[in-house]
Image (spheres, rainbow, N blue to C red):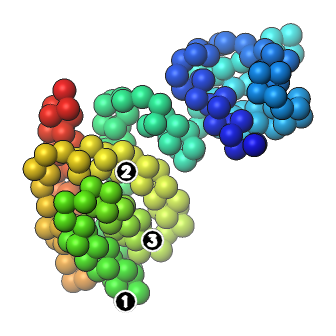
Amino acid sequence: MHGQTVEALASRILSDEWGEGAVLDLPALREELDISLTALREALKVLAAKGMIDARQKRGTFVQPREKWNMLDADVMRWQTAAADDPGLLDELTEVRAVVEPAAARIAAGRASEEDLESLRDALADMAAAGDDPEASVQADLAFHRRLMAATHNNFLVRMERIIAIGLAERDKLVHSAPAAEDPVPSHRKVFDAIVAGDPAAAEQAMLALVTKAQDDLEKAQRTRS
């Protein structure tokens, strides 16, 4: 019930039903959602921690401007990508990937353990086996990128995996379901081979090429849909 309440309130903010500065009528909300005032306040605390709302004396509980939101929060990212078809948001996520993932590949090339390599190899095999199954392709693609971040053995980069995975999943849903989607295995294998070879520069360049191609594929898929 707590999670459902948080999701319900967040959806109203993301849909602009409650725009920036909107003051929430807590008694009316409590009655509408049929929950206790304590339960409602607990849900609002979650959104406040994410920067989406704030509460002030004499003003009440109100919606914060987007620049106040914790954009790196996994829930906020998920809610935004699910709430609207926003090409700009996916473009921004691609920019983040272009900064983070090539560096992660470079680090992984110097730190990946045999276990990491085997895990990446399995993800590549799953990617190849997915064939024309869009859902299986998305999951295998996500697994490869998650495991690459884990192979850096850097706690901060591992946390970034959550953000990259959300953006990647939304991008993959469009790309892998598009007609004549290209085989993702060759570009990922180049990254993998460079990591196996322990070549940081080659791994970084291969990942940068992969992210650049991913953006091109996204733009093609978006044009196809329109």
Instruction: Give the mark nearest the N terminus, 3 or 1.
Output: 1
Figure check: 23 above or below 39: above
For the residue marked with disc 2, what is the amino acid? Ala
Residue carrying label 2: 169
- Compare residues 141 and 110 and report the one nearer the observer: 141
* Residue underneath mark 3: 150
Q: Nearer the viewer, mark 2 or mark 1?
A: 2
| 159 or 176, nearer to the observer | 176
The image quadrant where one finds the N terminus is top right
108 or 19: which is nearer to us? Answer: 19
Which residue appears at 19% of the width and 78% of the height? 193
Question: CA–CA distance between discs 3 and 2?
Answer: 18 Å
Is residue 87 found left or right of 210 in the rendered image?
right
Q: Nearer the viewer, mark 3 or mark 2?
A: 2
Name the secondary structure under disc 3.
helix
Label of residue 152 in the image: none
Q: Residues within 10 Å of mark 3 (few under 14, many from 20)?
A: many
Q: Residue lying farthest bottom?
A: 114
Question: Foreground: 195 or 28?
Answer: 28
